[in-house]
Image (cartoon, rainbow, N blue to C red):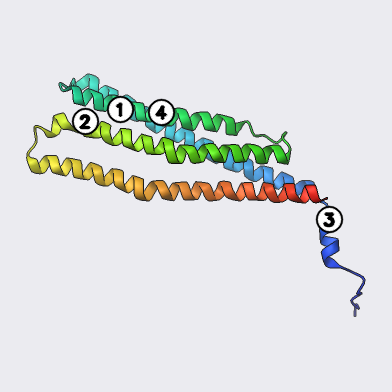
Amino acid sequence: MLMMNDNFNLKEIWLKQKIGEPNLAELLEKLNKYKYSNLRKLMLSNLLLVLTSAFIIYIWIQYQPQFLSTKLGIILVILAMVMFLFSNNKNMIGFTKIDNALTSNDCLKSLIDFNNKQKYIQKTVLSLYFIMLSIGLLFYFYEYTSRMSLLGSFSAYSITAIWIGFNWFYIRPKSIKKQQMKLDELIEKFEDLNNQLSND
């Protein structure tokens, strides 16, 4: 039977351990997975918003709306999508520059910078997007709802308002929270790694 030696201090042994290359490699692998997952989502959202814009332009050309409000509505909706795409793509391009050649400290700085820009997009750009989209749809529907009965007009605007509200109050916060949790976890792990390396 082995006897415990009082000379061993497990805490000291644990603290003296060097951070091995596999820990950093594991962390960079998680970063790459996060990066490529976001790139796939970005490409999908780009595709959907471009197709939606093309469809809206097709409707404009095909059905030739008469009211100025309809045309203004279409322009506002497309501008909202372009603004959102531009901001999101610009931020993601900077994020893709984070690679395995960077030090853990540089990775952390880049992640924090991406996080700050992401919060700006989630708070300011997304709010502006929803406002422009809502006003654009309000103007767009006016021409067509003016030909409907009062009940039809009310139904069209109500359904649209419910859909926008559902996206604003349920889908948006849920997706932001999920995305933020993953990013916060990565930042926390890089901070831990940097603290351990600076203590060695």
| C-alpha distance separating marks 1 and 2 | 9 Å
Q: Which mark is residue 76?
A: 1
Contact, CB < 8 Å: mark 2 with mark 4? no
Crowd rating for badge 1 (residues with CA inside 10 Å; few <14, some 14–19, many 20+): many
Q: CA distance from mark 3 to mark 4?
A: 49 Å
| Dot 2: element | helix
Residue 59 in percent (x, y) is at 24, 25
Q: Where's residue 146, x and y in %?
A: 10, 32
Which residue carries the number 2 mark? 139
Given this view, does label 3 or label 4 mark the residue nearer the observer? 4
Q: Which mark is residue 17?
A: 3
Q: Is 143 left, or right, of 56 in this rendering? A: left
Instruction: Kindly state the secondary structure of the residue where label 1 is placed.
Output: helix
Q: Is residue 25 visible?
A: yes
**Among numbered discs 1 and 2, the one appearing first in the sequence:** 1
- Up the image or down, 58 lies above or below 178; here it is above
Check contact, mark 1 vs mark 3: CB within 8 A.
no
Please tell me which of labels 4 and 1 falls first in the chain: 1
